[in-house]
Amino acid sequence: MIAVAFLPVLALEGQEGKLFRPLAYTKNFAMVVAAVLALTLDPALRLLLGARRRILAGAGGRVQRALKSLAGRPNSFARDHPITRSAHAVVRANSSLDSSLEDAE
């Protein structure tokens, strides 16, 4: 998609074409190379260099367990009180809309 945006630059003529055409070619070439590497080299390197052990569900250090327990409290409250969660979402959306309208004026 990004490479398509530079295609009109290739149609430029005169001084503008001389100035921007090398940029468009270079950028499109870099995007093609990046796409090829992302589809070929990246998955292969992930298989070769990645960890081949299973990650256990209960594994983790003290910090990770503490963070999970802290995150679990608000999540369980939101799961158990869907009306409160919906009301909170409406209030936040309304306040952000109000602040964006005030900035526009």
Image (cartoon, rainbow, N blue to C red):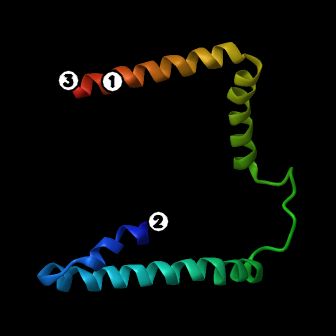
Task: Residue at 86% x, 70% y: name it.
Answer: 53
Residue matched to label 2: 1
Instruction: Give the number of the disc on residue 99.
Output: 1
Which circle, 1 or 2, is nearer the viewer?
A: 2
Residue matched to label 3: 105
For badge 3, the amino acid type reads Glu
Judged from the image, the secondary structure of the residue bearing numbered disc 3 is: loop
Judged from the image, the secondary structure of the residue bearing numbered disc 1 is: helix
The reply to whether discs 1 and 2 touch (Cβ–Cβ < 8 Å) is no
Distance, label 1 to label 2, CA atoms, is: 33 Å
The reply to whether discs 1 and 3 touch (Cβ–Cβ < 8 Å) is no
Q: Nearer the viewer, residue 92 or 62?
A: 92
Task: Residue at 32% x, 79% y: name it.
Answer: 24
Q: Nearer the viewer, residue 8 or 62?
A: 8
Q: Nearer the viewer, residue 95 or 73?
A: 95
Tell which circle, 1 or 2, labels the residue nearer the N-terminal end: 2
